[in-house]
């Protein structure tokens, strides 16, 4: 088996698109060698813990309403091409994702990481839920078979906060500037949302060498 590390943020639309395209390729190649582990990378590490109004965030990030609309028109086009029906209008707040990354970390301990990562993407992009809210995160954990009460207690503590921040900082120190970033066998880096054809080719090449 080959380790596939995925650096992402659950509020990153390109991460959802990239994950969708990767998993489509893996469905085409059920003999793929990948063992997946998810790693934290916050798009907005300085976001207030309570998050902020999404429209204000986007306009500040992209330099105005016109620019934000143009950027998200391209994202919506790419999402639709990937077969995703993202309801951007339903997203009212941009959350701080530190707690979402903590949940992904805890899910990894229970071998439920990909399930929870996918549920976070769905909750935010398809259902317009605030994944910075502890109740929402506990509900997502419950839906993935984790103990919601335990998760809620952990979220109320500082458990693994510094670990997530350190791992995020380490990724930046290693040169990661955007996500999604895929790292194969701790050696080969595949940046961005790549089409299934590229992943199928890589899988075939790797399987041919095993």
Image (cartoon, grey):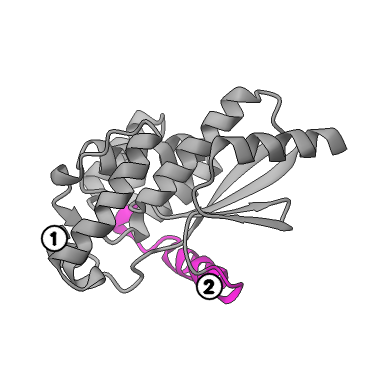
Above-or-below relation of 135 to 188 = above
Q: Position of residue 108 (x, y in %)?
A: 53, 44
**Where does the C terminus fall, quadrant-wise?**
top right
- Location of residue 181 (image quadrant): bottom right
Number of marks present in the image shown? 2
Q: In the picture provided, is 28 more to the left or to the right than 105?
A: right
Residue to which mark 2 is pinned: 172
Above-or-below relation of 208 to 174 = above
- Location of residue 86 (image quadrant): top left
Question: Which residue is rendered at x = 74% and y = 58% of the image?
Answer: 187
The stretch of residues the image draws in magenta is: 154-176
Is disc 2 surrounded by few (<14), some (14 to 19) or many (20+) residues within 10 Å? few
Q: Nearer the viewer, residue 206 or 137?
A: 206
Cα distance in 3D space between marks 2 and 1: 27 Å
- Location of residue 199 (image quadrant): top right
Residue to which mark 1 is pinned: 55
């Amino acid at each position: 088996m080959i380790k596939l590390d995925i650096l992402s943020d659950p509020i990153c639309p390109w991460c959802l698109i990239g994950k969708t395209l990767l998993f489509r390729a893996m469905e085409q190649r059920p003999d793929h060698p990948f063992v997946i582990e998810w790693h934290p990378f916050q798009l907005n590490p300085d976001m207030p813990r309570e998050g902020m109004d999404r429209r204000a965030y986007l306009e500040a990030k992209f330099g105005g309403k016109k620019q934000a609309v143009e950027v998200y028109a391209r994202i919506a086009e790419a999402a639709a091409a990937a077969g995703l029906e993202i309801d951007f209008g339903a997203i009212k707040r941009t959350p701080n994702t530190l707690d979402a990354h903590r949940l992904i970390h805890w899910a990894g301990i229970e071998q439920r990481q990909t399930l929870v990562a996918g549920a976070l993407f769905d909750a935010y992009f398809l259902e317009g839920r605030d994944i910075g809210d502890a109740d929402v995160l506990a509900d997502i954990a419950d839906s993935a078979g984790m103990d919601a009460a335990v998760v809620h207690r952990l979220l109320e503590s500082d458990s693994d906060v510094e670990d997530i921040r350190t791992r995020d900082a380490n990724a930046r120190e290693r040169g990661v500037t955007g996500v999604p970033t895929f790292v194969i066998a701790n050696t080969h880096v595949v940046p961005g949302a790549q089409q299934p054809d590229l992943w199928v080719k890589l899988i075939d090449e790797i399987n041919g060498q095993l």
